[in-house]
Image (cartoon, rainbow, N blue to C red):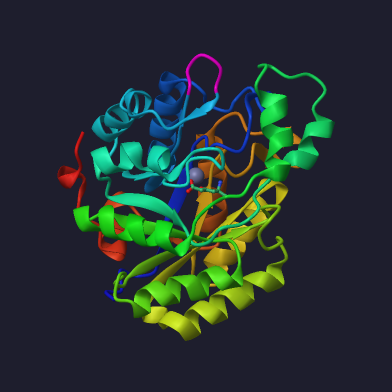
Amino acid sequence: MKDTGRKVIISCAVTGATHVPSMSEHLPLTPGDIRDQAIEAAEAGAAIIHLHARDPEDGRPTPSPDIFRRFVPAIAEATDAVINITTGGSTRMTLEERLAYPLLARPEMCSLNMGSMNFSIHPLAAKISSWRYGWEKAYVEGMEDMIFRNTFKDIKRILLELGGHGTRFEFECYDLGHLYNLAHFVDEGLIKPPFFIQSVFGILGGMGADPENMTVMRSTADRLFGRENYHFSVLGAGRHQMSLVTMSAIMGGNVRVGLEDSVYIAKGVKAESNAQQVRKIRRILEELSFEIATPADAREMLGLKGADKVTP
Ligand code: KMH
Ligand code: ZN
């Protein structure tokens, strides 16, 4: 793998499908909000922008290609950031729904979740006393009984269908076993290096946000894939976000921030935008003498096909 001089890729996950509008007035909901916050995050230094769509009427997660098309091309037009579209969607969407837009757009990059699991923020429901939209309470409470489905067959389908169009993946690994699932597909010949491994910490249903877990993920990935064959990255859910991603950079990895993963900028303080989180991690990394990857660096590091090969 070509050494581009150890630059750190900042990914920004702009809105997601787990957090609900009542958690932060700054969570972008409409196509215009998502577009503007994504562009600002890219200008602040995010080389990769990870995107979900929401219904403009009430902020409910949606897989609708029509809604994605109301902001993705505008972001691509305004920035040279790598656009990374979710294939995880939400735990309530079918795989068919989750793949509807990615299969049309054939992005440079998509997320790919490496195992089925529980995935929930239901304990938060008890802490929210006033709900902005009628759907939110049942949505959050209902996560207690949801399964985030990502079977071997589902993963294989995504690798074959999207991978067949040259899309490469942010492999989201929430547990040690997910690295072994990834290794299984490498053994099957369905994935070629360089792999981009997003280790996810602090999701209820996945591994906890203990720093020790990161050393286990890192050393296991080294053993399974060889450090020269993959790029490590970390996201930390909620209050663990900034400390865990900083640790990733120190361990030779990359970072993901964004309101999809945490609505905070500091203890008890809500982030006013995605760009604010990007600026904060950029500041920390530069203070530590890390160099930030540009979108061109990220494309080279991850072997991406280029923005010109994406269907607008
Ligand atoms: N919010 C992340 C923990 C996806 O979009 O595929 C999950 C995620 C899933 O990013
Ligand atoms: Zn996502």
Q: Position of residue 20 (x, y in %)?
A: 63, 29
Q: Is residue 58 a member of the stretch shown in magenta? A: yes
Quadrant where the N terminus sits is bottom left
Residue 202: x %, y % from top left:
68, 55
Q: Is residue 75 visible?
A: yes
- Residue 175 appears left or right of 37: right
Quadrant in which residue 130 is drawn: top right
Image location of residue 57, percent across then percent down: 51, 14
Extent of the magenta region: 55-59
Q: Quadrant of residue 18?
A: top right
What residue do we see at 78% from left, 33% from top? Answer: 125
Does the magenta run of residues contain 28? no
Q: Check the image and name the residue furthest to the bottom.
A: 223
When the figure is inspected, residue 3 is found, relative to residue 266, above or below; the finding is below
**Which residue corresponds to the image point at 73% horizontal and 65% vertical from the top-left?**
210
The residue positioned 28% from the left and 59% from the top of the image is 160
Q: On the rendered structure, is 49 left or right of 80?
A: right
Q: Is residue 68 above or below residue 180?
A: above
Residue 305 shows in this picture: no
**Residue found at x 83% / y 32%:** 127
The single residue placed furthest to the left in the displayed view is: 308
**Closest to the observer, 145 or 57:** 145
Return the residue nearer the eye: 150 or 267: 150
Question: What secondary structure prevails in the magenta region?
Answer: loop
